[in-house]
Image (spheres, helix red, strand yellow):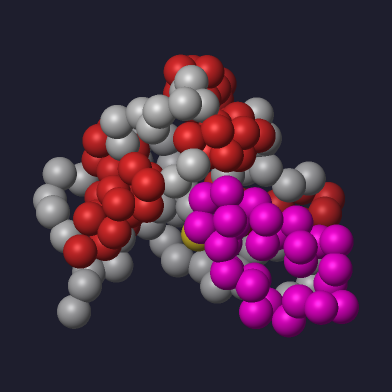
Amino acid sequence: MVVGHSMGAMIALDMAIRHPEKVQGVVALNAIFRRRPDAAEAVQARAASLDGVSMADPSGTLERWFGTDGSPEREACHTWLTEVNPAGYKAAYTIFAHQDGPDADDLTDLNCPRPCSSPERTSRTRPPPCRRPWPRWPHMVARRSSRVPRT
């Protein structure tokens, strides 16, 4: 089982596509698939704003991921985002910003279990049809409104 979030989801899906004999299941959280033009422009602008020397303020990223409420998870991500190597982060984020997700045909051929959840409909997302083939599933993008409540 391979699990990934965001860029890690891209890596998890790529691994499952390239090495199906080694992957029995994949969980891709907040995976990208065919970004809308405005979303692609925004992420590429964020990548271009990184200087590779100092870390950018992660406030906007944390608000997109967690909303404005504080939590241990938000604080852990804040720590990670401010302590990572700025040059390495710029290089990885630049690659991420210019990717558009896996090929739909590769997803169709992927033959392993894949969990699916249905976030609320928003202006930028639509709930995934969980029982349909892969090419339609990746349109799911989890948003704050669809987070699983902590217990």
Question: Is 91 in the magenta?
Answer: no
Front-most of 12 and 72?
72
Residue 72 place in picture, x, y as percent: 20, 64
Residue 75 place in picture, x, y as percent: 22, 55
| For residue 1, above or below residue 18 | below
Question: Is 26 in the magenta?
Answer: yes
Give, as a single range, the part of the protein colored magenta: 1-28
Tell me if 26 is positioned left or right of 149 in this view: right
Front-most of 4 and 85?
85
Count numbered badges in the picture.
0
Residue found 31% across the figure and 36% down from its top: 58
Residue found 25% across the figure and 40% down from its top: 63
Residue found 47% across the figure and 26% down from its top: 53
- Quarter holding residue 46: top left
Front-most of 49 and 67?
49
| For residue 52, above or below residue 113 | above
Work out whether residue 22 can be spotted.
yes
Work out whether residue 38 can be spotted.
no
Residue 61 place in picture, x, y as percent: 33, 38
Q: Residue furthest left?
A: 69
Tell me if 16 is positioned left or right of 140 in this view: right
Q: Quadrant of the N terminus?
A: bottom right
Q: Quadrant of the C terminus?
A: bottom left
- Quarter holding residue 73: bottom left
Residue 96 place in picture, x, y as percent: 61, 37
Front-most of 33 and 85?
85
